[in-house]
Image (cartoon, rainbow, N blue to C red):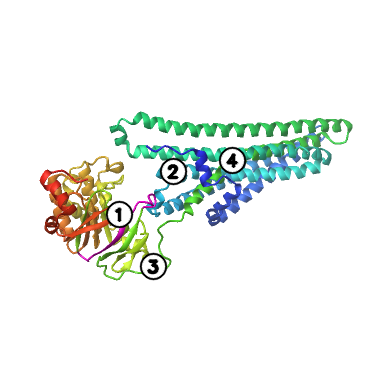
Amino acid sequence: MAHGNPASAIAEERGKSRRLGSLRALLPFMLPYKGLMFAATLALIATATVSLTLPMAVRRVVDNFNAEDGALLDYYFTAALGIAALLAIGTAARYALVTRLGERVVADIRKAVFDRVIGLSPVFYEKIMTGEVLSRITTDTTLIQSVIGSSVSIALRNVLMMAGGLVLMLLTSAKLTGLVLLLVPVVIVPILTLGRRLRKLSRENQDWIAVSSGNAAEALAAVQTVQAFTHETISRGTFGEVTEKSFDAARRRIWVRALMTAIVIFLVFTGIVGVLWMGAWDVRAGDMSAGALVQFVIYSVMVAGAVAALSEIFGELQRAAGATERLVELLETEDAVQDPAAPQRLPAPVRGEIGFEHVQFSYPSRPGVSALADLDITIRPGETVALVGPSGAGKTTIVQLIQRFYDPDAGRVTLDGVALDALARDDFRQHIALVPQDPVIFAASARDNIRFGRPDATDAEIEEAAKAAAADGFISALPEGYDTYLGERGVMLSGGQKQRIAIARAILRDAPVLLLDEATSALDAESERAVQAAVDRLAEGRTTIIVAHRLATVKKADRIVVMDQGRIVAQGSHDALVAEGGLYARLARLQFTDGIAAE
């Protein structure tokens, strides 16, 4: 099981600073909804304006409380009720608009990130755990949704309240306003000082959440292996450890944020009490009316509340800035394998000739180990070629390069004479059908799993493909036949049944190039004979490359290519290679004489 790296190391790798300017990266996702943004802004300005007029009505009420004309008092109270109604309507409209905007933008971000990562080559996934990618798509986008759908709106409203309140405070009493402004630096210093600490802890918290998610995804994806080796306790301990580290980072972040909030609120309201004290003496001296003092106090409370709210929202914005940077990293990831700017087109019809011209290749995660060394081979259209040899000889690497999951370090791979790196990947991959060694079964019905090979296939074509792959029998016996849900990773099926589903998928694709990577490795003898017959029929007229350890499955191949340590050491028919001696003859002797499977 993989253990998470220290969060500090992860944070350092991705960049130490998390600035609010990172939120600008959200603008391209928000600009398509200018109308929604404009309406939300109008509602925001309207509610702020209405809120700022309320203290004026209160002042009128206080100053005219003892007035002889009771109608005037009724008028002011009625006006106050009207203002409250407008405030309620405006606040509801603002909430509805900004929440909808947040949900819409985050949905677009999630789609954009998934669209990006689903097309990245395996090189990318050698460097990052799938669980961490999922954490960014879910946890990080949830943070952004909270900010766009709430925090930004509240922040802008409080900025307006603070600015408007200060102006109206100044108009009410310049003297008292001057005293209040003297307190501003005292409040700003702890916000800036603790804000930097809060930003660092927020990022550390998010990093540990990503590590925790990756650890859980890895364990759950291999849950049967974990249980088979009674590794549950260790897995629980590992997950618990990284989860506790995430909680510890969150706890420290919460305390810093709470401390910052407490300091700011205490300083602000201490200042208000002091100013109110002086204002009370001004009222006694007749320098201002009681209503004016009440108005000033209300505006002071509004400004203080706005500052306190902004100090809290500042932390949320910082967390969202970190989340935005993490998502932007995915969106801006440079893929090691890219389509050319002006891709060529394959000549039609596709014949299926595959060429390796002096190919050298090492996996990016193992740059010092040569997977293929000066590989030079041409596979003719319609030819069936079997690749055999010990594990690590480079057989599966050839299959991966044919699909251009990686690019060779030197030399080139061609299809019908055109280099793969000169073609759009979607263009040439549609002419290739694959049966991998570890078949992938999706959490869908048997019918949909086979249809994955060709989405526009009819039900009849799907069932014909299943029959050709010797899969129709067990599929028909399932509770709902072809419409039976197979569970996550095909948990309802045996290994051989999964392999036959994968073979049916490849048969349905009906591509001119067929790649079989240990396609019959999980089948019993009876099923293997049935599937082998289907594969033989399928291979007719197609370029077929078979990767196999079991030599009995490749004896009929047009050509057997023997590989060792990334090189071709021999090639020919089964009989010729046995007569020649060498590695193939030794493997054949082990399998056919001693019955020991070559590893």
Q: Quadrant of residue 546?
A: bottom left
In the picture, the disc for residue 132 is 2
Which one is in front, 219 or 66?
A: 219
Question: How far is disc 4 from disc 1 in space, using C-alphas?
Answer: 44 Å
For image coordinates 28% across by 58% down, the residue present is 456
Which image quarter holds the C terminus?
Answer: top left
Q: Residue furthest right?
A: 285
Gap in Å between the C-alphas at discs 2 and 1?
A: 26 Å
- Estimate the x, y position of residue 167 in percent, counting from the top left: 76, 45
Q: Is residue 258 left or right of residue 293?
A: left
Residue 410 location, quadrant: bottom left
Report the predominant secondary structure element of the magenta stretch: loop
The amino acid beneath tag 4 is Arg
Mark 4 is surrounded, within 10 Å at the Cα level, by few (under 14), some (14 to 19) or many (20 or more) other residues, namely many
Q: Residue furthest top?
A: 233
How many residues crowd mark 3 within 10 Å: few (<14), some (14–19), many (20+)? some
Q: Earlier in the sequence, mark 3 or mark 4?
A: 4
Location of residue 312 in the rendering, given as x and y in whole percent from the top left corner: 62, 38
Q: CA distance from mark 3 to mark 4?
A: 45 Å
Amino acid tagged 2:
Glu
- In the rendered structure, which disc, 4 or 1, sits on the residue that comes first in sequence? 4
Residue in view at x 55 percent, y 56 percent: 31
Q: Which residue is mark 1?
A: 397
Where does the image place residue 597, in percent across and percent down from the top left?
Answer: 17, 44
- Spatial distance from mark 2 to mark 3, Cα to Cα? 33 Å
Q: Which residues are magenta?
A: 363-382
What's the amino acid at mark 1?
Answer: Thr
Circle 2 packing at 10 Å, graded few (<14), some (14-19), many (20+), is many
When the figure is inspected, residue 151 is found, relative to residue 467, above or below; the finding is above
Q: Position of residue 501 (x, y in %)?
A: 23, 49
